[in-house]
Image (spheres, rainbow, N blue to C red):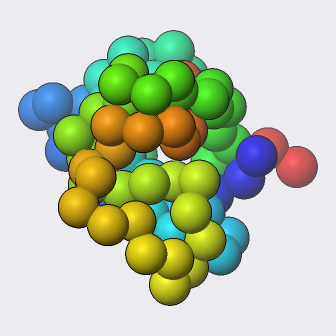
């Protein structure tokens, strides 16, 4: 799946990408390291791989990546089913 780099913190090697529908999805250092990158700049097109998370296995990101724009995710901050990014790498054409 393709996305656009939105934020990146080089100290923690984590950040967020924006899906093509504008949904921000966080990634952690493990996903960044899996892609073999050394740096990521906002605006770069990236390829991401995701996996479905089970109830209770989410991260406290506050973003339900499986919900579309404008969806009401309630007060549940990622503890339900959703997506987790497992790899971030540059998009090649």
Q: Is residue 76 left or right of residue 27?
A: left
Q: Residue at x 11, y 32 (%)?
A: 11
Q: Residue at x 88, y 49 (%)?
A: 93
- Residue 62 appears in which quarter of the rendering? bottom left
For the image, the number of numbered tags is: 0
Where is 24 relative to 22, above or below?
above
Where is 91 relative to 85, above or below?
below
- Residue 14 appears in which quarter of the rendering? top left
Residue 57 position, x and y percent, is 38, 22
User: Is residue 68 among what the camera can see?
Assistant: yes
Residue 53 position, x and y percent, is 52, 27
Q: Is residue 90 left or right of residue 82?
A: right
Q: Is residue 19 left or right of residue 71?
A: right
* Towards the viewer: 74 or 21: 74
Residue 47 position, x and y percent, is 68, 42
User: Is residue 44 among what the camera can see?
Assistant: no
Please identify the residue farthest to the left as the structure is shown: 11
Q: Residue at x 42, y 39 (%)?
A: 80
Please identify the residue farthest to the bottom as the structure is shown: 70
Where is 29 relative to 85, above or below?
above
Q: Residue at x 51, y 15 (%)?
A: 34
Where is 90 relative to 21, above or below?
above
* Towards the viewer: 84 or 79: 79
- Residue 74 appears in which quarter of the rendering? bottom left
């Amino acid at each position: 799946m393709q996305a656009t780099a939105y934020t990146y913190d080089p100290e923690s090697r984590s950040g967020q990408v924006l899906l093509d529908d504008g949904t921000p999805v966080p990634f952690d250092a493990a996903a960044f390291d899996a892609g073999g990158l050394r740096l990521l700049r906002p605006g770069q097109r990236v390829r991401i791989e995701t996996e479905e998370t089970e109830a209770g296995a989410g991260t406290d990101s506050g973003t339900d990546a499986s919900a579309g724009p404008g969806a009401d995710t309630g007060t549940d901050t990622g503890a339900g089913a959703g997506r987790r990014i497992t790899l971030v790498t540059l998009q090649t054409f």
